[in-house]
Amino acid sequence: MKQPTGSPVERLAVLGAAAGEAVERLRQSPVPVIEVGCATCGRAAGALETIAGFEEALAANGVEAEIRRVGCLGHCYAEPLVTIRYPGFPPLLYQKIGPGEAGILVRSFLKDGSDPCYEYLIGALEPDENFPTLMDYPRYLFEKRVVMEQCGLIDPEDIDHYLAAGGYRALAEGLEKGGEWVLEEVKAANLRGRGGAGFPAGRKWEIARSVDKTRVIICNGDEGDPGAYMDRTLLESNPHQVLEGLILAALAIGAGRALFYIRAEYPLAVEIMEKAIAAARERNLLGEDILGSGFTLEVGVFKGSGAFVCGEETALISSLSGHRGMPRPRPPYPAVAGLDGLPTIINNVKTLSTVPAIIRNGHQWFHEIGTENSPGTAIFSVVGEVEYPGLVEVPMGVTLAHLVNDICGGVKDGKALKAVQIGGPSGGCLPVSLLDTEIDFDSLKKVGAMMGSGGLVIMNEDTCMVEVARYFTDFTQGESCGKCTFCRIGTHHLREILKSITIGEGRIEELEDLEEISTSVIKGSLCSLGKTAPNPVLTTLRFFRDEYLAHIEEKRCPARMCRNLTAFYIDLEACARGCDACVACCPTEAIFTTSNRKKAIDQEKCVKCGECVYACPPEYDAVRRVSPPELIPDQGVQPLDSGAGSEKEQ
Amino acid sequence: MLEQILASLDESEREAIDEEELQVLERVESELVTFPSEPSHLLPILQHIQARHGYLPKLALRLVADYVGVAIGKVYGIATFYNQFRFNPPGRNPIKVCLGTACHVKGGDIILENFERRLGIREGETTADREYSLERVACIGCCALAPAVVVGDKVEAYVTPSKVEGIITEIEVRKEMAAREQKKNETANG
Amino acid sequence: MSEKIVTITVDGKKITAPEGAWLLPVCLEHDIYIPSLCWLKEMDDPPASCRLCLVEIEGLPEPVASCRCPVREGMVVRTNSDEILKLRQVAFRLLVSTNDGHCNTCIANRSCELQQIAKFLHQPLRTKRLRHIDRDYPEIIDDHPVLMYEPKKCVLCGRCVYVCSQNERGYKLDFAKRGMDTIISFYGSDIDPAAKECADCLACTEICPVGALSSKEKWRRFIAEVRLKQEQKKQKPS
Ligand SMILES: Cc1cc2nc3c(=O)[nH]c(=O)nc-3n(C[C@H](O)[C@H](O)[C@H](O)COP(=O)(O)O)c2cc1C
Ligand code: SF4
Ligand code: FES
C-alpha cells in the first residue's frame, strides 16, 4: 500500500479522507444495506441463521442488497438485531429478527420500500420525523456512551469505518505532541483503571516510564468473571478503538513491546483483533515509524488458556512466560519489573478504550462526565431477572436504583427486587435498602461491594442469598490457584459450610466460622483473588442473615430455591382433569395420574427442576412450590389404578 | 524424535498406544517445528495441539517437553493448571453447559443434571462409545440468553430440560441419517 | 543488597540488619521465632505461600509475609499481636484440616515441622473446629522408580520443587493441577529413564517438612519397623 507523507496529522487526514469516501460510497449506494449484529451473543441468538434467511429471501425475491456483519449494540434482550439502511429512510433498527422475520422484511420492505415493518422496529438510529428514534427510549436516553459509542454501528472488520468516524485522530495528535503529553493528559483526566481496582492509569504509566529499560504494555482481555462480557464486546465490536488506546498507552510509557492477552474462550475476539492489527499495520498505524513519527511498535495477541486467576497481573505475566499462572507476591510491582523482568503495564480493555476519547476531547471534557473522584463512564453487564438485560454504559455516580429501574426496565414479570450482586465473584450482594448507593469506585467499596468486573446480577424474591453466596464461593474456590494456604483451603471450607447450609445440614456455630475464615482469608491471602473471594459471603451474612437462620434453624429456604429444602406438588383444586401438559415435560417421569384423572408428583422421583411449573397452562397454574417440603398438604392422592381400566381407555 | 521416544519405551507401554494416538503423535511431531523451541512458547504449542487434536496424549507432552527443552513433569504441571486442556480423547459431540452467573440464576445446574441423566455420564466424562462428552464451563458470554449450552461449536440459547431431550434427539437423528446414507452408498457401490 | 546496616524494632526489641535483607531470617537470627513452612534461606525469590510468617508492620494497612519483606531503616514490626496470633492459628487449622493426622505411623513423626509449629501455636494437630477435608487422592503415589509421595500428608509448601529445580538434572517433580487439587507430581518419570538417577540425590525427601516424600527403600524399611512394633505390642499385653 502506498503511504502518504507529511506529519502524522497530515498523513492521518489522507487516510481518514480515503476511508470517509469509501464509507460514504457505501452509504450512498443505491442498494440497501442490511447490518446484522454478529458478535458472539448475536450468533448465539441465531444471527448466522438470520443472515442465511436474508440471503435466501433476497435470492428468491430477486432483491439486491448488501449484507454486512457488525458488532454488538449491547441490547442483548433484543438479539438478533438488524439495521437496515434503505435509500430514502433513516437507518432502522429491528429486534429479534430470525430467518422468518428476515423473509418478511425482504418481501415487505427491501423489495420496494413499501412497508418498513413497524412490528419489529425498535427505532431509527438518527433523528427522524416519521420514526421513533432510539433517543425516545429510556435505555438510550439515560445512557452515556463514550466507550461503546460505535459498538454495533460500525463494521469491526473494516478499518475504514473506524477511520471515517474519526478513529486514530487521537493517535496522530499524540504522535505529534509526544508521549509525555499523552501521559499528562491521561493523568489530568484521572482515568482510573476499569479492571476492578480503580488505580489511576496515569500514575501507573508514570512509574513504568521512570524505569530505564524496554517497557511492555499489555491489554488485559482475560475477563474471567462468569457474568460479564463487556470486554469481549468491545474487542469484537470496535477492536480499533482498543488498539488505538493501546498504541497511545505504549506511546505514553515509551513501550517497545505491546500485547493483547485474550482468553481462550473468546475465539472470535482473537480473530477480529488479529485482523484489526493487520489492517492497522497496512496503513502504518502500527509497525515501524508509525505515521512518520519515528515511533515504532509491534503488537501481538496471546491467548489465555482458561484460568480466572490469570486476570491478576502477576499471574498473567507468569502465564505469558509459559508457567503455571500463579500470582507472585508484590513488590516488585509489574510496573517496575514484570514480563522478563521488564517494566510492564497492564491495563483493562475498557481503560484503554477510553484513552482515545480523552485525547481527542481533552481531560476537561472527561471530568464533565461522572463524579469528581471517578470521572468518566462505567459499563455494566446487567443480567438476571431484569426486563432489558444487556450492556449498559452510564456516567459514574448514577444510583443503582436508576440503573436497574429506569434504564433496564426494572425486575422482570413485575416481581419484587430483592438484591443486586455487583462486581462479579469478588463483589458483594446489596439489598434493596442500599439501592441509593452511587456507582463509583469509592462508594461501592464503602458498602462492602466493588466495581470489579462490572457484572451486575439482578435478583428477585425467588433467589436465595445463601445459594448465591455458595455459587460465587464455589466459583472462586474452583479458580483458586492453590498457592497460598488461606485461599486454597479457606475458600474450600467456606464453600463446604455454605453447601451444608443450603442442603439443610448447617449448624448455627458455623456462622461464626464463616465470619472468622472470611476475615482471615481477606487479610492473609497472597493475591486479590483470595483477598476479595469472601465478599459475597460477608455481604450476604450482613444483609441477609435471616435467610441463613431460616435455612439452619427451620430447614426452610425462604426463596424456595434450595432444592433439598423445597418440594413441588400439584394443587388438585386447580389441576384440570385429563390435561397432560406436565407429564410430557418431566424429565424423570415423576408425574402420575391420580384416581380422579388429575396429576400428582412422586416426591421420590422428582428432581425439582421446575419444568412442570412452566408446562402447566397458565389458566390452571396448578403447580405449587413449598419450603420446607413438609408443607405439602395431604390431598389424599391415590394413583389411578394401573390395572385394566386406564390402559383400555387409550 | 518420536522414534527415539518410542524406542525407549517398554514393550507393554508401546503396545498400549493405539493406531489413532500414534497418528496424532506423528502429526504433532511434524507441527511442532512451526513453533520456536523456547519454554515461553509452551502455552501456544499446547493450545495448538488441544485445538487440532482435541486432547494432549502423554507422549505428545513428552514430545513438547523434549522440543522446548524442559522436563515433562513441568509441561504436565502447566497443562493441568489451565481449564482448557484435556488428557483423554473427547466425545464426538462435546457438550459444554454454561454455569456462569446468569446461567446459574436461570437454572444451569438443572440443565447439567438433565444431560447427566440423559447421557448416563457425569460432568467431565465421556460416554463409553465416545459419542458424547459433558463439561461445565464458566460464562461463555451469552448471559442475556441464559441458560446456554455449547454443543460442538454451536451455542444453544434458553435451554430447558425438554430442550435437552431435543438436542440429543437431533444429534441421534443426524447420526442415524448419516449411517443410512453411508449404507446406501455402500450398497450402491458394492 | 547494600552493605548499609539499619536498625529496626521487632516486638519492642531493637535489632540491626543489612538493609534489604528479608525480615524472617533477620528475626530468626535474633531469636525471635516466626513459624514458616515454605521458606528456605537459599531462596532468592521466596514464594510466600504458606502465610504462617505474617507479621504486622507499622504504617502498612495489612499483615505482610516476613519471608519476603525487605528490612528498612526504622521499621517497627510486631510478630505477636492478637491479630497475628489469630491469623497464624487459622492458617494452621486450615493446613491440618487437610492432613490425615496419622502421626504414629508417619515416617516424620517427631521430626515433623507441623508438630513443632503446633506446639508453638498451642494448636492441636487435629482440628475439631473445622471439618476434615479428605482430598480425593490415594494414600500413596508411587509412579516414580525411586520416590514415593503421600498426598494426604503434603502441605504444598513447594520446597521439594525448589530443591529439585536447583539440581541441574532436576525437575523430576513439580506442582500439577490447581487449587484444592494441587499436588506434587512425578508425571512422566515412568517413561523417563533418567528418573532412576534420583536415587543419587534425594534432596526433596530431605527438605520435606512433613515426610510426604520419601525414598521407596527407606519407606519400606520404616513400614517394616512399624509393623514389627505393632506385632510386638499386640503380643506383649496378652
Ligand atoms: C483474580 C483476579 C482476576 C482479575 N481479572 C481481570 C480481568 O479479567 N480483566 C482485567 O482487566 N483485570 C482483571 N483483574 C485486575 C487486574 O489484576 C489489574 O488490576 C487490571 O488489569 C489493571 O488494569 P486497569 O488498571 O486498567 O484496571 C483481576 C484481578 C484479580 C485479582
Ligand atoms: S490468594 Fe488464591 S489465587 Fe491468590 S495466590 Fe493465594 S491461592 Fe493463589
Ligand atoms: S514462610 Fe512466609 S509465607 Fe511461608
Image (spheres, helix red, strand yellow):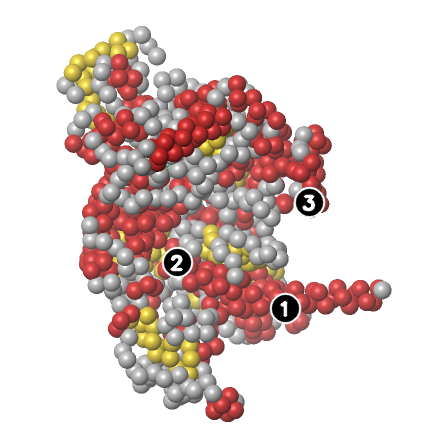
Q: Earlier in the sequence, mark 1 or mark 2?
A: 2
Q: Amino acid at mark 1?
A: Val
Using the image, name the chain to which the residue with label 3 belongs: B
Q: Which mark is residue A61?
A: none
- Residue A398, how many percent across, how many down? 26, 52
> Looking at the image, which is closer to me, A110 or A622?
A622
**Is the CB of the residue bearing disc 2 within 8 angstroms of ligand 1?**
no
Work out which residue is located at the far left of the displayed protein and give it: C12
Q: Amino acid at mark 2?
A: His
> Is residue B54 something one can see in this rendering?
yes
Residue occupying image coordinates x 84% and y 64%: B189
The answer to whether B84 appears left or right of C153 in the picture is right
Mark 3 and mark 2 on one chain: yes
Q: Earlier in the sequence, mark 1 or mark 3?
A: 3
Residue occupying image coordinates x 60% and y 38%: B58
Q: CA distance from mark 1 to mark 2?
A: 30 Å
> Is residue A431 something one can see in this rendering?
no
Q: Which mark is residue B173?
A: 1
Which secondary structure, mark 1?
helix
Residue that numbered label 3 is attached to? B18
Q: Are marks 1 and 3 in contact (CB under 8 Å)?
A: no
- Residue A180, how many percent across, how many down? 39, 27
- Indicate the quadrant containing the N terminus of chain C: top left, top right, bottom left or bottom right: top left
Residue occupying image coordinates x 17% and y 14%: C14
Residue occupying image coordinates x 65% and y 64%: B175
Residue that numbered label 2 is attached to? B104
Which secondary structure, mark 3?
loop
Q: CA distance from mark 1 to mark 3?
A: 30 Å
Q: Are marks 1 and 2 in contact (CB under 8 Å)?
A: no
Work out which residue is located at the far right of the displayed protein and give it: B190
